[in-house]
Amino acid sequence: MNLAFGTPYFNLPTDRCRAIGARGGRRRALNLRLRQASKAPSAPQVDLIPEETAHEASLLLDQKFPHLTGAERRAIRWVRA
């Protein structure tokens, strides 16, 4: 049973029912495009503060904690028994 606006189309051939469905699909796509076009695109917020790099952060930590300088390099050597 094919329904359009609550009315069954028993007497319509399959091709005609497909044409009605295709018309509805095209109209829905048009409405979606119009709805998306009506929305104002939001401008991306640009962060003007420069981000700190990992190297700069590492240098800052080395200045604050000189006894930990070079701690990221492992000094442990594995000894085979």
Image (cartoon, helix red, strand yellow):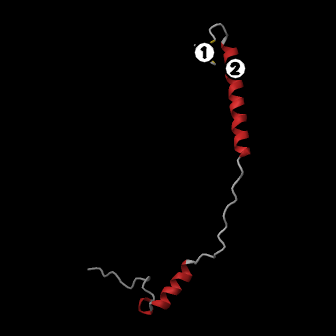
- How would you rate the neighbour count of disc 2 (Cα within 10 Å): few for under 14, some for 14-19, many for 20 or more? few
Q: Quadrant of residue 1?
A: top right
Question: Is residue 23 shown left or right of residue 57?
Answer: right
Q: Is residue 74 above or below residue 31?
A: below
- How would you rate the neighbour count of disc 1 (Cα within 10 Å): few for under 14, some for 14-19, many for 20 or more? some
The answer to whether the residues at label 1 and label 2 have Cβ atoms under 8 Å apart is yes
Residue designated by label 2: 20
Q: Is residue 56 above or below residue 1?
A: below
Question: Is residue 2 shown left or right of residue 33?
Answer: left
Please name the amino acid that badge 1 sits on. Asn
Residue 54 on image: x %, y %: 54, 78
Residue designated by label 1: 2
Inter-mark Cα distance, 1 to 2: 10 Å
Residue at the image point whose x is 31% and y is 82% from the top: 79
Residue reaching furthest top? 11
Q: What secondary structure is found at the residue carrying circle 1? A: loop
- Is 4 in front, or is 62? 4
Residue 5 on image: x %, y %: 63, 19
Q: Earlier in the sequence, mark 1 or mark 2?
A: 1
Please name the amino acid that badge 2 sits on. Ile
- Is 35 in front, or is 79? 35
Residue at the image point whose x is 63% and y is 76% from the top: 50
- Is 28 in front, or is 59? 28
- Is 70 in front, or is 50? 50
Question: Is residue 81 shown left or right of residue 26?
Answer: left
Which numbered disc covers residue 71? none
Q: Is residue 68 above or below residue 7?
A: below
Question: Is residue 21 shown left or right of residue 67?
Answer: right
Q: What secondary structure is found at the residue carrying circle 2? A: helix
Residue reaching furthest bottom? 66
Specify the quadrant that holds the C terminus.
Answer: bottom left
Residue reaching furthest left? 81
